[in-house]
Amino acid sequence: MKVLNKEISEKLLSKIISDIKDKPQFKNIEESFVKDLLKKELEKDSKLLDFIIKHNIKNLDRSEKYKNLIKKVRSILHKSYGIFLTYDSKRLNELILKLKEEIDVSENPMKTIETHEKVLNTHRSTKERIKIYPKLYWSIWSITGKPRKIIDLSAGLNPLSFPWMGLNNVDYLATELNKSDCDVLNSYFGYTRKFGLFGLAIQLDLQQVLQKPEILKGLPRSDICFLFKVLDSIELTKSHKISEIIISTVPTKWVIVSFAIKTISKKPMSSTRHVWIEKMCERLDYKFKRIVLKTESFYIIEKKI
């Protein structure tokens, strides 16, 4: 890999990535994503880059500079991915199989609601959202109308809230960073075709849209796009450039953006408003409505298409 026109050997690169991922919560993250983050960090500090390249690889672990680099990249990974894991995350595969067994013998998704809730509890965002799902979708559909086609970016386990959506015969495209997460969603979509949920999950790194907005332009035109608790986790700066590209480029009339109203430690945010997104909508001549439920603040944005 080249960084600032300097070559990092495959052996060194492999070691750095291995050290970064040497935590249970990061083991399923794609190496390409870790590599991109590492490259961005090294591009910020040419002296650190020179130090890493020239240092004896056997002694790197003893260096405070190296340790700080590993901590920095892990911190970004935690913000982008690890922060959404819960104590029950390790039970996900077991619960998905149980859900399949229940779906196979049920004619109504609401009959499997208890196991759906257990699966949703394995992901922090959906765990916090369970109690508001019924009111959330009713509130959204009352403004947008019921969608026939949905895009869910960095979906997590949100597609498994389907029983609360009150929809049937819907095409659902979900994106996730890791293949393993896509595999879970695609398994679920395979089980739920009988209920009229025709879904597909694909890998997509939203941070790439800064350089390649065509990634989103190539998605199928849909009625609505969910961006639930996504933007804060992918923005590495305060410019909101990635957020604006995503909102303006995704091929849907409606974009639903949500933000947490409490911190991870359950303390209330200083404000549930996000002035930057309101100013962006005003500048782009987008209409929006804002609703605040128990755990999240939602912006329902109507684009001009």
Image (tube, rainbow, N blue to C red):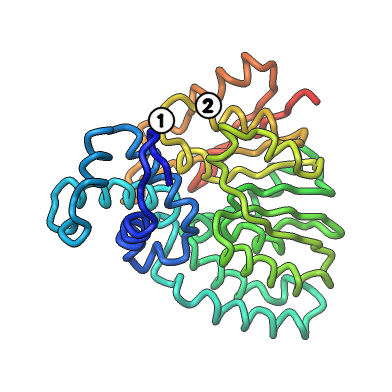
Picture quadrant where residue 162 is located: bottom right
For the point 69% across and 72% down, the residue is 187
For the point 47% across and 60% down, the residue is 29
Residue under pointer 1: 237
In the displayed structure, 219 sits above or below 167; it is: above
**Marks 1,2: beta carbons within 8 A:** yes
CA gap, disc 1 to disc 2?
Answer: 9 Å
Where is residue 304 drawn, in percent x and y? 77, 23
Check disc 2 and report its element: helix, strand or loop: helix
Where is residue 202 drawn, in percent x and y? 67, 56
Which amino acid type is marked by label 2? Lys
In the displayed structure, 296 sits above or below 201; it is: above
Where is residue 155 drawn, in percent x and y? 60, 53
Q: Residues within 10 Å of mark 2 (few under 14, many from 20)?
A: few
> Left or right of 55: which side holds 38?
right
Where is residue 289 drawn, in percent x and y? 65, 29
Mark number, residue 241: 2
> Left or right of 107: which side holds 132?
left
Q: Give the camera-side residue of 198 and 212.
A: 212
Which amino acid type is marked by label 1? Thr
For the point 27% across and 52% down, the residue is 70
Quarter occupied by the C terminus: top right
Picture quadrant where residue 26 is located: bottom left
> Left or right of 8: which side holds 205?
right
Q: Give the camera-side residue of 192 and 214.
A: 214
